[in-house]
Amino acid sequence: MLRKAKIEDAQAIQNLICFYSEDGKMMFRPLEEIEENINDFRVYEKSGEVVGICNLKYGWDNLVEIRSLGVDPRYHRQGIATQMVQDSIEQALLNQNCDTVFVLTYAVQLFEKLGFQIIDKMGLPQKVWNDCKQCLHQDNCDETAMSFSLIPMKKQTPLQESDQVLYS
């Protein structure tokens, strides 16, 4: 079951982050940072255990970043990461100030399958790179930057009640 993270999920979230950060596949995040930003996390729970995590980071003009996406290896290839990325896109669509979702990733095939396009990471705004100061690969980044435009999807959304023309 995919759901919004709760504060009591913070340790399980950090455990998955630590698992992937040990070999440089994910950036380490302190427990305090996770707790402070718990509302930006979604978790996938199976049999009462957090087995998937994902974080959306807003704050770069019209961009939102999918980060800290990870699934417990015991549950790989069950569609959990796909569901979490699709949910992230849906969450980003709810934000009126967001028109592009981006990710820095090693899972290029997953994101390509979901409609993301490879982009030049140097084209991302400079403030995106703030977190990179703490990354093991900061001087030799080997992640692939990818983006997904929300604009076509936003154009397809039905009119809000306040947007409808009223006839008398």
Image: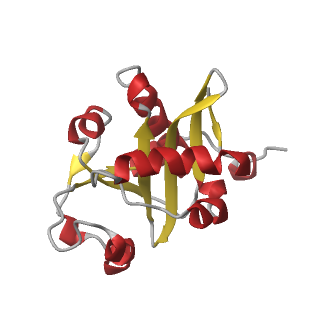
Instruction: Specify how the rendered protein is coloured.
Output: secondary structure
Give the x, y percent position of residue 52: 50, 36
Quadrant of res 133: bottom left
Tell which of 51 and 155 is nearer to you. Answer: 51
Q: Quadrant of the N terminus?
A: top right
Horizontally, residue 4 falls left or right of residue 26, namely: right
Residue 97 coordinates in the image, percent (x, y): 54, 64
Total marks placed: 0
Q: Is residue 5 left or right of residue 134?
A: right
Q: In this view, does 141 lie to the left or right of 45?
A: left
Location of residue 122 with respect to 17 vertically, above or below:
below
Q: Can residue 127 be seen in this view?
A: yes
Residue closer to the observer: 141 or 152: 141
Residue at 75% x, 45% y is 161
Give the residue displayed 35% in from the left and 73% down from the top: 134
x and y percentages locating residue 36 in the rendered image: 65, 65
Residue 18 image offset from top left, x and y in percent: 43, 51
Q: Going 78% across and 46% down the picture, which residue do you hit?
A: 166
| Residue 93 visible from this viewpoint | no
Observer-nearest residue: 88 or 55?
Answer: 55
Give the residue drawn at x 85%, y 44%: 168
Please identify the quarter of the rendering in which residue 31 is found.
Answer: bottom right
